[in-house]
């Protein structure tokens, strides 16, 4: 059975739609109660906004955006471009250009080789690494489970020993109390006999 049932009788109690004049009057009454700066000033019951702490790099970027300055270039792409021939035919100029071209070619060849190896073996190495990490995690979880079981066994044994010792301690306590009680009873009986002997001696002396 649903908790809420629709009833046609409740529809007659719905508020009628407001007219334009009524809405304007209500809006003016609400505006008259609000302070002039209610759109720009937070309410007094609201807590203050936390101060933002940006890093120096982010603050620098904010300042650049505020000033409209162009963005600084990131990676220098000129190292990947082919070098232009020197303007002069001097041997030193060509030697410098050839040396720079050789360095750039060696760098690009090494980078291309590394990217090729990464594309070919990177995924498999990543999967193998994940598999090794999973195996290590399973071993650690198994070790944790074993240690937890051993800890539970030790706690169970200590609890059983504590219960046995508690029963023995209570028995010794009761025995000690009974022994003290019997010793007091003997001492009381001995004192009674001693008094009785004294009384008889006094009576015979008369």
Image (cartoon, rainbow, N blue to C red):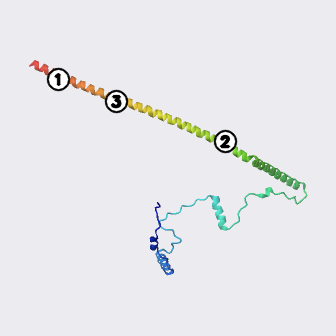
Q: Which of the two marks, 2 or 1, is nearer to us in this view?
A: 2
User: How far, Cα to Cα, is label 2 from label 3?
Assistant: 60 Å
What is the x, y in percent for residue 10?
A: 45, 70
Q: Which residue position holds label 1?
A: 195
Asked if marks 1 and 3 touch (Cβ < 8 Å), the reply is no
Residue occupying image coordinates x 72% and y 47%:
123
Quick one: label 2 or label 3, which is nearer the N terminus?
A: 2
Q: Which of the two marks, 1 or 3, is nearer to us in this view?
A: 3
How packed mark 1 is, by other alpha carbons closer than 10 Å (few <14, some 14-19, many 20 or more), is few
Quick one: label 2 or label 1, which is nearer the N terminus?
A: 2
What is the x, y in percent for residue 193?
A: 19, 22
- The one nearer the camera, 21 or 206, is 21
Q: Secondary structure at mark 1?
A: helix
Q: Which residue position holds label 3?
A: 173
What is the x, y in percent for residue 39?
A: 53, 72
What is the x, y in percent for residue 40?
A: 53, 71
Question: Is residue 117 depicted above or below 148 in this figure?
Answer: below
Q: Which residue position holds label 2?
A: 132
Question: Is residue 128 depicted above or below 32 in this figure?
Answer: above
Q: Quadrant of the C terminus?
A: top left
How packed mark 3 is, by other alpha carbons closer than 10 Å (few <14, some 14-19, many 20 or more), is few
Q: Is residue 130 left or right of residue 149?
A: right
Residue occupying image coordinates x 78% and y 49%:
116
């Amino acid at each position: 059975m649903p908790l809420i049932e629709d009833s046609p009788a409740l529809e007659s109690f719905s508020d009628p739609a407001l007219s334009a004049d009524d809405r304007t009057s209500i809006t003016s009454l609400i505006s008259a109660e609000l302070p002039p700066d209610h759109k720009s000033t937070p309410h007094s019951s609201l807590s203050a906004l936390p101060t933002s702490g940006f890093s120096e790099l982010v603050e620098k970027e904010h300042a650049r955006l505020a000033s409209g300055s162009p963005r600084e270039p990131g990676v220098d792409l000129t190292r990947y471009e082919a070098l232009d021939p020197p303007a002069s035919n001097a041997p030193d100029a060509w030697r410098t250009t050839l040396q720079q071209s050789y360095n750039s070619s060696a760098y690009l060849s090494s980078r291309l080789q590394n990217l090729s190896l990464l594309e070919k073996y990177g995924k498999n190495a990543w999967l193998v690494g994940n598999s090794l990490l999973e195996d290590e995690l399973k071993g650690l979880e198994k070790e944790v489970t074993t240690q937890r079981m051993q800890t539970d066994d030790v706690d169970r044994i200590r609890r059983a020993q504590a219960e046995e010792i508690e029963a023995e301690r209570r028995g010794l306590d009761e025995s000690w109390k009974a022994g003290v009680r019997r010793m007091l009873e003997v001492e009381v009986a001995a004192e009674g006999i001693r008094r009785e002997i004294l009384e008889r001696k006094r009576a015979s002396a008369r």
